[in-house]
Amino acid sequence: MGTVTEQHRAVAMHAIKIMGGEGRPKVQAFQDDHRQRSVDILTTFSSPEVGLKSIGSIGLSDFPLHYPDGRELETRVELCACAEQDALHWDNVVASTAFAVMRNRAAVRPGSVIPDILQDYFPSTRMPHVYLVPPFFWNDARFPGLQFPPVAINWLQCIAIHESERQLVERIGSDAFDDLLQQQEMDVLDMHRAPVTGAL
């Protein structure tokens, strides 16, 4: 990722502290297709439990994000995800999502959809989009932010969603969609799960 800064170290240590895991965490540098952007991806194993792994970005928070009217988002953002320990490509998914956010510099928040990220890694997937939610797999669904003056950094969790679910989010809003995910007890780690059903 180029120069590792004190902020990057603080982000990594904070994520490791919340995610936990066993053994030595892995940090790998990723570059986008044009080698114009890079991000480090942290992976911790047996986290949040045996059989799963936790993944987090390091360096997305270097970039201020902006609302459509030009105002800066009040917080910087890093991404995280949880996947089965033997699942392939989720480090790439988190990196590609980070690159999409870096490219657009548009404010993201819980309920944001980053379209068509998974298609490159899972060509036959029925869930091509990344949906951002408050992190809920770790620390009893509490993933506190990091204060690294002068910036505040918060994490958003990446989960995969169907195109029909993207349309549902657009139609009913993210809060109502999140309620449906919970009510229908969707296993968001299952890349073959059925879509949420709701009144379109």
Image: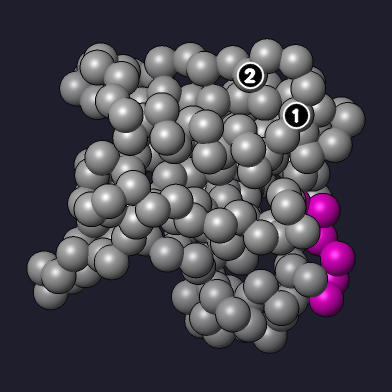
Residue 190, image x, y percentages: 79, 44
Secondary structure, mark 2, is strand
Instruction: Check if residue 126 falls in the magenta segment.
Output: no
What secondary structure characterizes most of the magenta part?
A: loop
Residue beneath label 2, please? Answer: 25
Residue beneath label 1, please? Answer: 21
Instruction: Name the quarter where the C terminus is drawn.
Output: bottom right
Secondary structure, mark 1, is loop
Q: Which range of residues does the magenta coloring cover?
A: 183-188
In three-dimensional space, the C-alpha distance between marks 2 and 1, rounded to whole angstroms, equals 8 Å
**Label 2, residues with CA under 10 Å away: few <14, some 14-19, many ≥20:** some
**Label 1, residues with CA under 10 Å away: few <14, some 14-19, many ≥20:** many
Q: Residue at x 28, y 66 (%)?
A: 74
User: Do the CB atoms of the residues marked 2 and 1 lie less than 8 Å apart?
Assistant: yes
Please say if 90 is above or below 136: above
Instruction: Name the quarter where the N terminus is drawn.
Output: top left
Q: Residue at x 67, y 34 (%)?
A: 54
Viewer-proximal residue among 128 and 59: 59
Q: Residue at x 61, y 25 (%)?
A: 43
Question: Which residue type carries mark 1?
Answer: Gly
Residue 69, image x, y percentages: 12, 74
Q: Is residue 132 visible?
A: yes
Please say if 80 is above or below 51: below
Residue 109, image x, y percentages: 42, 64
Viewer-proximal residue among 128 and 27: 27
Question: Which residue type carries mark 2?
Answer: Pro
Q: Residue at x 48, y 44 (%)?
A: 79
**Quadrant in the picture for residue 84:** top right
**Quadrant in the picture for residue 47:** top right
Instruction: Check if residue 186 falls in the magenta segment.
Output: yes
